[in-house]
């Protein structure tokens, strides 16, 4: 049982790619002013290795619909794109391009 648990934890750790501490420190300086929000989004875009057009292309392939709205988000040490379509929502990891969630 311990071996099964350790193997499961190992695979989940390998699959989840998190930001490094230096990248996280750049993101954490968040300001609620309009210019602060723009700088925050610019920092997120600078850290992301997958660009928005590539993420949108991956989402179109996954759902086969036109895109209504997309946004780069940071939550729980993860950087990802949320792409909304008429009947489908897709979260794509901004560091490796994998599909994190599809609804």
Image: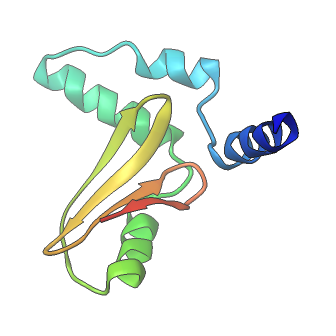
Q: Which quadrant holds residue 65?
A: bottom left
The C terminus - image quarter? bottom left
Q: Position of residue 96 (x, y in %)?
A: 60, 55
Q: Residue furthest bottom?
A: 64
Q: Nearer the viewer, residue 21 or 6?
A: 6
- Residue 50's place in the image compared with 5, above or below, is below
Q: Which quadrant holds residue 35?
A: top left
- Residue 81's place in the image compared with 76, above or below, is below
Image color mode: rainbow
* Image point (21%, 81%), residue name: 66
Q: How many marks?
A: 0
* Image point (12%, 24%), residue name: 34
Q: Is residue 8 left or right of residue 89?
A: right
* Image point (56%, 50%), residue name: 49
Q: Position of residue 81 (x, y in %)?
A: 37, 52
Q: Which quadrant holds residue 44?
A: top left
Q: Is residue 102 left or right of residue 9?
A: left
Q: Nearer the viewer, residue 7 or 44?
A: 7
Q: Position of residue 36 (x, y in %)?
A: 22, 20
Q: Residue furthest right?
A: 3
- Residue 16's place in the image compared with 98, above or below, is above
Q: Nearer the viewer, residue 102 or 93?
A: 102
* Image point (30%, 16%), residue name: 30
The N terminus - image quarter? top right
């Amino acid at each position: 049982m311990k071996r099964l648990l350790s193997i499961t934890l190992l695979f989940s750790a390998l699959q989840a790619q998190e930001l490094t501490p230096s990248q996280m420190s750049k993101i954490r300086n968040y300001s609620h002013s309009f210019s602060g929000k723009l700088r925050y989004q610019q920092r997120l875009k600078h850290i992301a290795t997958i660009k928005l057009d590539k993420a949108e292309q991956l989402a179109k392939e996954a759902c086969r619909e036109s895109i209504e709205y997309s946004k780069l988000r940071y939550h729980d040490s993860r950087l990802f794109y949320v792409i909304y379509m008429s009947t489908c929502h897709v979260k794509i990891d901004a560091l490796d391009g994998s599909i994190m969630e599809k609804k």
